[in-house]
Amino acid sequence: MENEKRTLKVGIIGLGDVSPIHIQAIEMSEHAELTAVCDIDPTLTSMVESTPFYRDYTEMISKHKLDVVHNCLPHHLHYPVTKGCVEAGVHVFLEKPVSISFEEGILQKNLEDESGQKICVCFQNRYNATFIKLQDVLSKGETGAITGIKALVTWYREDNYYQSKPWRRTKKEVGYGNIMSQSIHTLDLVQLLGGKVAAVKSTLSKLLDVDSEVEDTASAVFTFASGSRGYFHATNANVDNSSVELQVNTDQATYIIRDSTLYQMTSEGEQEKLAVDEKLEGVKFYFGASHKLLIDRFYNAVLEDTDDYVSVADALPSIQLIEMMAASSRTVTEPVTISPELFKS
């Protein structure tokens, strides 16, 4: 009964683009109250006018004795700031990615394992209704084992996306481009479905005419330890932000998630609708509504002292997959531009 009455004191570090959905989820939660926020930009106080605002997260934590902090900072600050919070005795809800590299991810895992504090990584798409239903259907094995997986993330990011926040285009600060900033959620789902990856062949490239050190496009073929195969393509060079598509082939059926809906393809080529994702008003369509589900799950884990959340160990395979893709791409000869003149007789 004591845990049911307790309200967690929650803070946010970093009031960038994704922070409004965290603020909304906290305000909707029965288990938490937004106690304080922190950002180095003082003009952002208007985002949460009635909430104490700090420019130093250590001061925020010490003054309010917070239970949980949401780390919504740029990628290169995920580990050091999380480390500071955990060492101060605060649990952390960490925006993806878990770290800027696999090596740093191991340090993050050690931090969680040794500190006693919980670190939840924001892979909210694991809790989409479509993906949960897909996992449930596949677990029954009624249509056989998975034989192949296809994943497409075709979005668009204009030059202003990189110019407005320069850390997004600097290797040292962002790590990788599309595969770490946009399509990592889909990579996470692919590895959850496919299991251990045995081999990767990949190319990372820059198709956009923008000033960036990191890739905006990636293509890869995965060979899973099970013997099944995966194809992955992601880009920021599309003409718009198209729906993410995730297709799973089994021995006897094909399942497709697109436009936030899960379909099973019938033998006649028709689509049977199996599930639809919940949508949250006031947020970008590709965010979905599952942030709140994961955040509430983490708050419950803190209150009940369980491990029912996306831990650092759970999130590490996605970073390993990214590093494998990058390593594979470095072994491929640099792409060349083909001129139409080459095809004239």
Image (cartoon, helix red, strand yellow):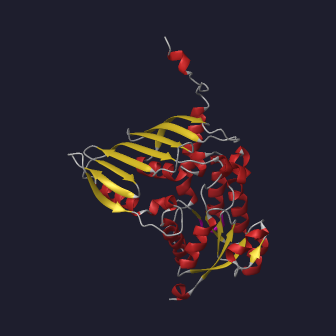
Q: Is residue 25 magenta?
A: no
Q: Is residue 229 left or right of residue 238?
A: left
The chief SS type of the magenta part is loop
> Front-most of 306 and 51?
51
Image location (x, y in percent) of residue 300: 52, 75
> Hey, which residue is sitting farthest left in the picture?
268
Q: Residue at x 50, y 46 (%)?
A: 154
Residue visible at 29% across and 58% down in the picture? 273
Task: Locate residue 117: give its quadrant.
Answer: bottom right
In the image, residue 299 lies at what x, y percent? 55, 74
Observer-nearest of 20 and 250:
20
Q: Which residues are magenta?
A: 115-119
Please determine whether, in this image, residue 70 is positioned above or below residue 271.
Answer: below
In this view, the residue in front, 184 or 323, is 184
User: Can residue 174 be seen?
Assistant: no
The location of residue 110, given as percent across then percent down, is: 64, 57
266 vs 61, left or right, is left
- In which quadrant of the rendered view does residue 44 lie? bottom right
Looking at the rendered structure, the number of numbered marks drawn on it comes to: 0
- Compared across the picture, whether 170 is left or right of 247 comes to right
Classify residue 31 as left or right of residue 70: left
Residue 284, above or below 154: below
Depth check: 212 or 3 in front?
Answer: 212
Q: Position of residue 116 (x, y in %)?
A: 63, 68
User: Can see residue 279?
Assistant: yes
* The furthest residue to the top: 345
